[in-house]
Amino acid sequence: MWLLQLPPKLSSPFINGFTPLSLSLSTKPSSIPTPNPPSFLPPIKAMKSLQGKVVCATNDKTVAVEVVRLAPHPKYKRRVRKKKKYQAHDPDNQFKVGDLVLLQKSRPISKTKTFVALAAPDRGSKNVLEKGDLNGEISIPFESQKEP
């Protein structure tokens, strides 16, 4: 019976073909300081977010959201609507069919859910036209009608 001897642990900087620049130019190793990022910068939040319409809200804590995007047709080079449905987490069951939601990327919640549904901001405010306006026209008051 023969013994299997393991090779001694190698701690050489030349393992896997790596030659540090400091060792290749001089015989004395020198430590290269690593720059720290400045602390006053905000963290980069590169999370993917999409906007779509709720098409199904029958499941508990889950909504199906349809996201529509415009993409060029591969042959005709014309912009075509592409639709895709995503499953999103709705912990309070607050969204109903037809609501506009914002999908925020998160950790995987289940096999198909990797987004969290958030309330989408309003697209545009209609407060320019009020009910008191005549025929929906915007009127500019005269100088005599302005309040002092």
Image: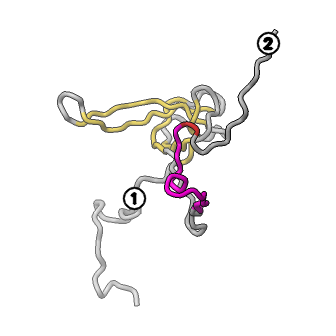
Horizontal relation, residue 70 to residue 88: left or right: left
Residue 140 place in picture, x, y as percent: 29, 75
Asked if the stretch drawn in magenta spans residue 1, the answer is: no
Q: Nearer the viewer, mark 2 or mark 1?
A: 2
Query: Element at badge 1?
Result: loop
Residue 128 place in picture, x, y as percent: 37, 64
Relative to 141, is 101 above or below?
A: above
User: Looking at numbered disc 2 in the image, what kind of residue is underneath it?
Assistant: Trp
Magenta region, main secondary structure: loop
Residue at x 57%, y 35% (from the top left corner): 114
**What label does residue 126 carry, if any?**
1
Instruction: Give, as a single range, the part of the protein colored magenta.
Output: 17-34
- The foreground one among 99 and 7 is 7
Relative to 35, is 50 above or below?
A: above
Residue at x 60%, y 60% (from the top left corner): 30
Mark 2 = which residue? 2
